[in-house]
Image (tube, rainbow, N blue to C red):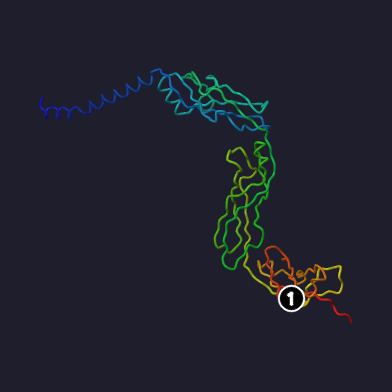
């Protein structure tokens, strides 16, 4: 037959040839799907603990999968593998810290807990598990905000950074809970702040096992920000700390006090709240320059005293 005749025949009969090929493929699939065979399929192993007094902390081997050998038609096995069978093991009561569990083929179910109808499990590997339990514990710990902020020029933190709620309950295995003293937030990161911010942020669960639970997954963190300002209080009397020696006074007896900090705190100050003092250790300190002690009258304030030292002298009699 000439090549031209072959080409002509193919052009004329290609629809029939394509149909025949498709029928052959479908027949092969149908016959294959009816073939009975054995196949190992990954199966989820789920331990469900219903005893609220304990926490399942570890399984040996450390896996949540078992390889189950099934027998059945190829099509049914393929459908089962796609839907992922499972072995659910309920544990109603914990009698001790360790328990051994043996998995049997009869425990295998389809996804959703339904019985297998068209396939049969033959074996399970691994089939022996050792479960470890710990008593469940609970306590309340402090929340520590993590804040990484920069402030715009002329602005300051005006109060403590706070989290609401300021404490949460942690619950989980006894050893893990006992080791937790506080929980931290994910970082709050801001740049060039000019005003107070208040944002909802997640808490980081302590440890990496995922067995510790928090009573609240997040808190609201507030970072108070105000403009910085300053005031100078002039002519503030200097006290002398030495109750055992009467008739002492500071020289000079009046100083100027510069207060710098958040605007609201600085503007609310009164001169009566300022108490610069010097401490006399003994007679040997008389007449010597002594530093002025001036604690900030409120948090987040800084203090400068001018002059920053005075002498202590005896008052002259009449």
Whole-percent x, y for residue 103 in the image: 55, 22
Element at badge 1? strand
Image position of 306 (left or right of 66) = right
Whole-percent x, y for residue 293 in the image: 74, 68
Dot 1: within a 10 Å radius of its alpha carbon, few (fewer than 14), some, or many (20 or more) residues?
many
Q: Which quarter of the image is occupied by the C terminus?
A: bottom right
Residue denoted by label 1: 255
Query: With respect to residue 69, does 259 lie above or below?
Result: below
Q: Nearer the viewer, residue 225 or 61?
A: 61
Whole-percent x, y for residue 35 in the image: 38, 18
Residue drawn at (66%, 47%), measured in percent from left and top?
Answer: 182
Image position of 148 (left or right of 80) = right
Image position of 61 (left or right of 317) = left
Q: Nearer the viewer, residue 107 or 101?
A: 101
Q: Nearer the viewer, residue 8 or 220?
A: 220
Residue lying at the far left of the rendered structure? 2
Residue lying at the far bottom of the rendered structure? 318
Question: For residue 231, what is the image quadrant?
Answer: bottom right
Residue lying at the far front of the rendered structure? 284
């Amino acid at each position: 037959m000439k090549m031209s005749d072959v080409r002509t025949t193919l052009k004329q009969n290609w629809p029939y040839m394509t149909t025949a090929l498709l029928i052959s493929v479908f027949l092969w699939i149908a016959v294959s799907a009816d073939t009975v065979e054995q196949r190992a399929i990954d199966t989820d192993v789920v331990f469900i603990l219903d005893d609220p007094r304990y926490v399942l902390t570890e399984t040996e081997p450390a896996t949540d999968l078992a390889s189950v050998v099934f027998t059945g038609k190829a099509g049914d096995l393929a459908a089962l593998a796609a839907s992922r069978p499972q072995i659910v093991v309920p544990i109603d009561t914990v009698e001790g810290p360790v328990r051994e569990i043996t998995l049997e083929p009869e425990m295998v179910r389809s996804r959703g807990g339904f019985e297998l109808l068209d396939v049969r499990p033959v074996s399970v590997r691994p089939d022996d598990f050792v479960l470890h339990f710990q008593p469940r514990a609970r306590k309340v710990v402090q929340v520590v905000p993590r804040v990484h902020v920069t402030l715009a020029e002329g602005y300051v933190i005006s109060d403590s950074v706070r989290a609401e709620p300021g404490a949460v309950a942690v619950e989980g295995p006894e050893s893990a809970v006992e080791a937790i003293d506080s929980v931290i937030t994910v970082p709050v990161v801001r740049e060039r702040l000019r005003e107070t911010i208040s944002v909802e942020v997640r808490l980081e669960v302590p440890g990496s096992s995922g067995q510790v639970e928090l009573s609240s997954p997040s808190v609201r963190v507030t970072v108070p920000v105000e403009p910085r300002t300053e005031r100078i209080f002039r002519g503030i009397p200097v006290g002398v700390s030495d109750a055992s020696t009467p008739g002492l006074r500071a020289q000079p007896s009046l100083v100027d006090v510069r207060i710098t900090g958040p605007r609201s705190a600085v503007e609310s100050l009164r001169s009566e709240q300022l108490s610069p003092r010097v401490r006399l250790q003994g007679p040997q300190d008389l007449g010597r320059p002594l530093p002025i002690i001036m604690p900030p009258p409120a948090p987040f304030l800084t203090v400068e005293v001018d002059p920053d030292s005075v002498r202590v002298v005896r008052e002259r009699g009449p």
